[in-house]
Image (cartoon, grey):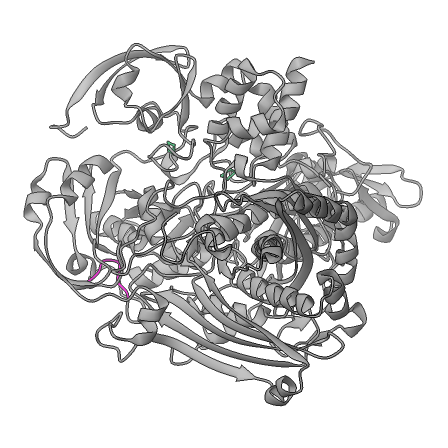
């Protein structure tokens, strides 16, 4: 179900026939991006701008001494060669701490490593020069004495503790926890049967097409640090730059222009970015650093390295009784600052069994330090792992009962009447629509026809499979998650809206635009909130100098949180406008309405005053206003939820695959998604968020892996080694919706940006296993590589090369 | 420019204008148009020839601006997305991308527009598989490509009409 754009009307044309909320509209600002007029970090540089390059550790774990920097510093065009000792006076070290993870072990980190590196790619020195090329020339001239130390790479190596990620620690455990229901043992003992599997998930990363980049400029006279950066949350970063560089927060400006993709990569404190800010402060000159692709692949946060032993208990009627999960997470050399890497694993534990009713739960978790890049909050944080584990177990149970996997799901999915409900994993479930989504999916797929196609294809010798995955994605996180743990992350958002001359509305929002279209969505909400066309609303974001402090872009929060703030701001502005006009035309505000930018009488629709005339009067001829009439044409609304730490969303995905018996390649024949993200503000944009998310999930299922060898050498440093899905690899992705608005807000929107990524790997894993099942084969590791398919089929021996 | 940087003087046309410049011999074509000519519509996504963000047209053919040196453009006719926009050569594609929301962050978009325009020049009625094949050298990390394929298909239809 493709949502065709509903309007091709030129920007500025007024439509009055439908509300803007719910209308498919293109994003006004993409005209600029299409013309090549985007403003990404690397697109501009002030006069005299210097360029930074980093000497990065070639080893996963080593001690080092920098023997000589003078040769490098003497190269023409080189302005400075900086080491840890040079940056220490201007940049404090930092350490990840969270009240949610008491006792978390994560050593201190610095902008430049001091004497020891703990992962390959960790910056140890920095050259600042007139050009990036010259800075890189100078890197080759820095003399370093390296003493390689034993490195911890695999989860098995981390567990064994034969080598240590950090020599001062006793083992490689960063954090561990265990919890469960009191009756867990009894429930499992009483089960009719238990299915179990060991799952392995390889590391992957976000690969925003625009790599991370920063341009920092320090004005010593004002004491002001101006930072342009490709980032998802300028306010969070402003706070940390201020803290680490010892500046008052008001003396740090962080501005994000166009951001070339984020996906959770651009929301952390990175050593190279802080080093760039520190160098700008130290040198008093603008310094720019833009990661190249190998730097991005090696040092952007990674995610999803988990080994999961999971069991599911089922009773004689085919009802799920409980889940038992033991998760071992590969966390990297440090827990990422400020949000911590452990969050991902906790998200796995919380999302287990999400769509289903069950009684008992036991979870055990070990988060392990390794001499590898840090891990963090990549799109759909942890959920795809929980979803793949849960949904595979569900298929195994259905197969054990000789039952249709959808019949098994239908019996076990949490019904509407059982909500609200807090499940044994701690997930609070409410306003979900599992059965409605399942029914809609069956229609969208045309399931009988597809099943017949699979049957006929198999009869003809083809390896075809259909797989399904129900999912719950927790979105729009509240401050209960980070704030309660003492981590300074804003979970609320603010919108400041003003009526401008000409009767248009301008707003500043604390949400961040990273391509997902939040500015368009907020414009549509404000338009309805006030009563004008979205083309007359302009929303600005991303600059701490003008936008109020708030959350930025994470956890699919734009529509749900900033959207509600925009609605409330719009309604307040509307109230101010109506009160002013009522006073002017001697009517009651309740008898007036604003429609298409004009104040009219509710009953008759008779025009009383346009917003343009009103703005002219109030802004330019205020002396003509009756005494005491002082309308406030700038209003602000700050919004956070009182309860509901997360807004759960739900849906179901289906995938159809074919396996090439000769090569083991998996070809995707179709992918379907039905999801419920509450009120949809712009169907066109929501569908594209879901498609984009599904394709990242397809990458997770079939292609993407950050690989390291046993010595911790990173072997996925180019886009020829790290494969992302390309246009030719992909099927058409059909999308359907069920709309269950969140009852706790006026707009009713929940998060939509991560649902696609959440369920796609599970649906594909199940589809591949469905194709393998008639051959007695199965798989439980992502990504699904051709060689593992051939091994599973017995066409390739365990040690045999393809 | 750093004093001991080896340079050459090149002359070429960029977006229809004659350009003469002293360029470091190791500067890539895309870095030169971006940082020396200020044509920042071409982007750098990988610098190793995989992503297509750096696409520019040289003598009528789309090339990887990261795999070609600026000095190799001596005597050539170079067109970037800015030039293609000004001439209107990609206007219908731009309209269709806009309407179909075939871009999110927009970082891949200029490269894809130039590639799609080249496809439509020699294949006015491509099917979806042909469009996907033609874009097999362009990474888009945001959209999942389907909207892009549909926008190109729609543009092909409008251009034939
Ligand atoms: S930057 Fe040239 S192909 Fe990626
Ligand atoms: S729109 Fe972001 S990479 Fe294509």
Image-quarter location of ligand 1: top left
Q: Does A595 appear above or below A390?
A: above
Does A202 sit left or right of A19 as displayed? left
Instruction: Tell me which residue sits at (35%, 58%) in the image.
Output: A241
Residue placed at 61% from the left, 68% from the top?
A393
Q: Is residue A109 above or below residue A783?
A: below
Q: Residue furthest right?
A: A604
Query: Is A138 contained in the magenta span?
Result: no
Picture coordinates of residue A335, whole percent (x, y)? 37, 67
Q: Determine whether A575 is above or below A101 in the image.
A: above
Front residue of A637/B103: it is B103
Residue A630 visible in rendering: no
Q: Which secondary structure class fits the magenta region best?
A: loop
In the displayed structure, does residue A250 sit left or right of residue A406?
left
Asked whether, in this view, residue A231 is left or right of residue A95, the answer is right
Q: Which is more toward the observer, A798 or A214? A: A798
Which quadrant of the structure image shows residue B95?
Answer: top right
Indicate the position of residue A501 as horizontal and vertical percent values.
64, 36
Q: Nearer the viewer, residue B106 or B146?
A: B146
Image coordinates of residue B63 in percent, x first then y, are 39, 22
Closer-to-camera residue (B136/A335): B136
The image shows residue B114 at horizontal and vertical percentages of: 49, 23
Q: Quadrant of residue B73?
A: top left
Q: Is residue A20 visible?
A: yes
**Residue A424 drawn above or below residue A669:** below
Q: Is A685 displayed left or right of A113 in the figure?
A: right
Magenta part of the protein: which range?
A: A109-114
Quarter where residue A65 is shown: bottom left
Viewport quadrant of the N terminus of chain A: top right
């Amino acid at each position: 179900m493709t949502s065709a754009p509903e309007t091709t009307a030129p920007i500025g044309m007024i439509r009055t026939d439908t509300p803007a909320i719910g209308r498919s509209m293109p994003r006004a600002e993409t005209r600029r991006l299409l013309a090549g007029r985007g403003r990404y970090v690397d697109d501009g540089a002030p006069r005299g701008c210097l360029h930074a390059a980093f000497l990065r550790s070639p080893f996963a774990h080593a001690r080092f001494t920098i023997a000589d920097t003078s040769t490098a510093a003497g190269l023409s065009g080189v302005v400075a060669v900086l080491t840890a000792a040079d940056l220490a006076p201007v940049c404090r070290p930092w350490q990840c701490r969270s009240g949610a993870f008491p006792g978390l072990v994560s050593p201190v980190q610095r902008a430049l490593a001091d004497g020891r590196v703990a992962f390959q790619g960790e910056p140890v020195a920095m050259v600042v020069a007139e050009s990036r090329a010259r800075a890189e020339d100078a890197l080759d001239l820095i003399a370093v004495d390296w003493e390689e130390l034993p490195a911890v790479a695999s989860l098995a190596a981390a567990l064994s503790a034969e080598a240590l990620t950090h020599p001062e620690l006793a083992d490689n455990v960063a954090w561990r926890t265990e919890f469960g229901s009191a009756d867990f043992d009894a429930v499992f003992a009483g089960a009719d049967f238990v299915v179990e599997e060991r799952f392995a998930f390889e590391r992957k990363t976000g690969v925003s097409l625009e790599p991370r980049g920063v341009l920092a400029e320090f004005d010593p006279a004002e004491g002001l640090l101006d930072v342009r950066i490709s980032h998802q949350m300028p306010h969070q970063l402003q706070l940390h730059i201020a803290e680490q560089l010892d500046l008052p927060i008001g003396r740090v400006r962080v501005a994000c222009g166009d951001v070339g993709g984020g996906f959770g990569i651009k929301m952390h404190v990175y050593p190279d970015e802080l080093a760039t800010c520190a160098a700008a402060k130290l040198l008093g000159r603008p310094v720019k650093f833009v990661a190249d692709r190998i730097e991005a692949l090696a040092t952007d946060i990674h995610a999803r390295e988990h080994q999961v032993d999971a069991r599911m208990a089922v009773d004689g009627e085919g009802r799920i009784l409980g889940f038992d999960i033991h998760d071992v997470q590969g966390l990297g050399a440090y827990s990422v600052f400020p949000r911590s890497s452990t969050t991902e694993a906790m998200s796995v534990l919380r999302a287990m069994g999400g769509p289903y009713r069950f009684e008992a739960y036991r979870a055990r978790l070990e988060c392990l330090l390794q001499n590898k890049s840090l891990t963090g909050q990549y799109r759909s944080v942890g959920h795809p792992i929980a979803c793949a584990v849960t949904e595979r177990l569900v298929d195994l149970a259905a197969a054990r009962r000789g039952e249709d996997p959808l019949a098994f799901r239908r019996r076990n999915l949490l019904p509407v009447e059982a909500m609200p409900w807090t499940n044994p994993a701690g997930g609070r479930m409410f306003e979900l629509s599992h059965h409605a989504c399942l029914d809609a999916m069956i229609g969208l797929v045309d399931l009988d026809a597809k099943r017949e196609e699979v049957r006929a294809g198999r009869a003809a010798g083809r390896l075809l499979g259909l797989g399904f995955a129900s999912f719950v994605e927790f979105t729009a996180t509240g401050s209960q998650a980070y704030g309660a743990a003492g981590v300074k992350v804003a979970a609320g958002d603010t919108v400041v809206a003003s009526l401008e001359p000409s009767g248009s509305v301008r707003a500043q929002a604390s949400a961040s635009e990273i391509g997902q279209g939040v500015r368009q969505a907020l414009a549509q909400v404000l338009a309805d909130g006030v009563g004008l066309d979205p083309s007359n609303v302009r929303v600005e974001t991303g600059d701490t100098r003008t936008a109020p402090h708030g959350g930025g872009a994470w956890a699919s929060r734009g529509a749900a949180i900033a959207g509600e703030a925009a609605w409330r701001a719009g309604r307040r502005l509307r109230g101010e406008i109506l009160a002013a006009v009522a006073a002017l035309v001697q009517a009651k505000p309740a008898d007036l309405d604003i429609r298409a930018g004009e104040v009219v009488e509710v009953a008759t629709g008779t025009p009383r005053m346009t917003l343009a005339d009103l703005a002219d009067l109030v802004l330019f001829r205020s002396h003509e206003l009756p005494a005491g009439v002082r309308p406030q044409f700038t209003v602000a609304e700050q919004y956070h939820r009182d309860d509901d730490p997360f807004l759960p969303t739900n849906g179901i995905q289906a995938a159809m695959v074919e396996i090439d018996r000769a090569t083991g390649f998996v070809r995707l024949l179709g992918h379907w998604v039905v999801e419920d993200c509450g009120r949809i503000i712009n169907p066109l944009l929501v569908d594209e968020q879901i498609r984009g998310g599904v394709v990242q999930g397809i990458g997770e299922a079939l292609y993407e892996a950050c690989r390291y060898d046993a010595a911790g050498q990173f072997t996925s440093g180019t886009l020829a080694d790290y494969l992302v899905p390309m246009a030719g690899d992909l099927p058409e992705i059909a999308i359907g919706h069920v709309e269950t608005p969140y009852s706790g807000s006026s707009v009713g929107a929940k998060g939509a940006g991560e649902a696609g990524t959440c369920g796609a790997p599970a649906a594909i894993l199940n589809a591949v296993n469905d194709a393998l099942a008639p051959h007695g084969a199965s798989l439980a590791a992502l990504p699904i590589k051709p060689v593992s398919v051939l091994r599973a089929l017995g066409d390739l021996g365990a040690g045999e090369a393809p | 420019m750093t004093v001991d940087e080896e340079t050459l003087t090149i002359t070429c046309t960029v977006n229809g204008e004659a350009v003469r410049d002293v360029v470091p011999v190791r500067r890539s074509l895309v870095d030169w148009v971006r940082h020396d000519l200020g044509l920042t519509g071409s982007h750098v996504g990988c610098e190793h020839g995989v992503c297509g963000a750096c696409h520019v047209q040289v003598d009528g053919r789309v090339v990887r601006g990261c795999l070609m040196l600026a000095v190799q453009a001596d005597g050539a006719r170079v067109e970037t997305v800015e030039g293609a926009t000004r001439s209107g050569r990609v206007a219908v594609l731009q309209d269709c991308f806009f309407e179909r929301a075939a871009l999110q962050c927009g970082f891949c978009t200029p490269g894809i527009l130039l590639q799609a325009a080249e496809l439509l020049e020699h294949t006015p009625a491509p099917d979806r598989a042909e469009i996907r094949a033609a874009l097999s050298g362009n990474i888009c990390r945001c959209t999942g490509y389907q909207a892009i394929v549909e926008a190109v298909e729609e543009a092909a239809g409008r251009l034939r009409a």
